[in-house]
Amino acid sequence: MAQAGAILVAALDLLESSIRPGVSTAELDKLAERFIRSRGGTPTFKGYRGFPGSICASPNAVIVHGIPGPYRCKRGDVISIDVGVTLDGWVADAARTFPVGEVSPQVQNLLSATEESLYAGVAQCKAGNRMGDVSSAIQQVAEGAGLSVVRSLVGHGVGRSMHEDPQVPNFGRPGKGPLLAEGMVIAVEPMMTAGRPAVRVGRDGWAIFSQDGSAAAHFEFTVAISGAGPPRILTPWHCAPEARTAEPVSQGAASTG
């Protein structure tokens, strides 16, 4: 799973370098698929329950599950990129939300606090803790920053399948919920909005929006729980430079439209 995670993180790094005003989410999707396959992996999302993309590309008020297509990033946007990679039958899953150029202070707070809440949750991923310890840590950071936790969406176990038990909520009470044990691997994924927590599903049946149209953020790690010491993040943001060798989206493609 760590090897799948290394491919995934390299793909996210490549996408980050390619996100700019004018680039379409379809172009980002093609770039990600080409890169993942070139490294011997398979895009986990493609074909999953009929999903047509290799990545989920979710701009602005889209929280998760955005289908890549003609939408072109604009300056001041945010875009959440969720990627799954399968390698030798094992799955890694991770997401980041990127600003497109300069964003407002409110949106920057959304991004910073959501990412901070992810690290707070991961810090509680220890054998002997309860899931509520993870969930509560995420909730405290997010709500302390004035964000709304999207309660209808959760993280999940991950392994041979992309979605396994247990669920990983982003709110909860310390000391409650399933016991965390050595060998468990979970996808911890805070999903927050700068407005209210209610959501709506788009006409395509996939994209999930903030109901009030407020900006949303999504950060995710695949995390392995060890018997002693800190948890192991299998999808850390940065990887060795040689793992990122690939051709980025061209300036010409990014600047059209």
Image (tube, rainbow, N blue to C red):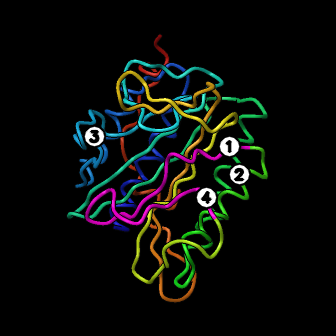
Residue flagged by tag 4: what amino acid is it?
Answer: Leu
What is the x, y in percent for residue 31? 34, 36
Q: Are marks 2 and 1 in contact (CB under 8 Å)?
A: yes
Residue that numbered label 1 is attached to: 148
Figure check: 160 above or below 28: below
Q: In the rendered structure, which segment of residues is drawn in magenta? A: 147-172
Residue flagged by tag 3: what amino acid is it?
Answer: Arg
State yes or no: residue 159 in magenta.
yes
Q: Quadrant of residue 214?
A: top right
Farthest residue, direction top: 257
| Mark 1 surroundings within 10 Å by alpha-carbon count, few (fewer than 14), some (14 through 19), many (20 or more) | many
Of the image marks 2 and 3, the number of the one nearer the N terminus: 3
Residue flagged by tag 1: what amino acid is it?
Answer: Ser
**Secondary-structure class at tag 3:** helix
Residue flagged by tag 2: what amino acid is it?
Answer: Ala
State yes or no: residue 199 in magenta.
no
| Mark 4 surroundings within 10 Å by alpha-carbon count, few (fewer than 14), some (14 through 19), many (20 or more) | many
Residue that numbered label 2 is attached to: 142
Q: Separation of disc 4 and disc 2 at Cα?
A: 9 Å
**Secondary-structure class at tag 2:** helix
56, 154: nearer the viewer: 154
Q: Nearer the viewer, mark 2 or mark 3?
A: 2
Of the image marks 4 and 3, the number of the one nearer the N terminus: 3
Q: Residue at x 45, y 82 (%)?
A: 181
| SS majority, magenta | loop
Residue that numbered label 4 is attached to: 118
Q: Residue at x 70, y 29 (%)?
A: 102
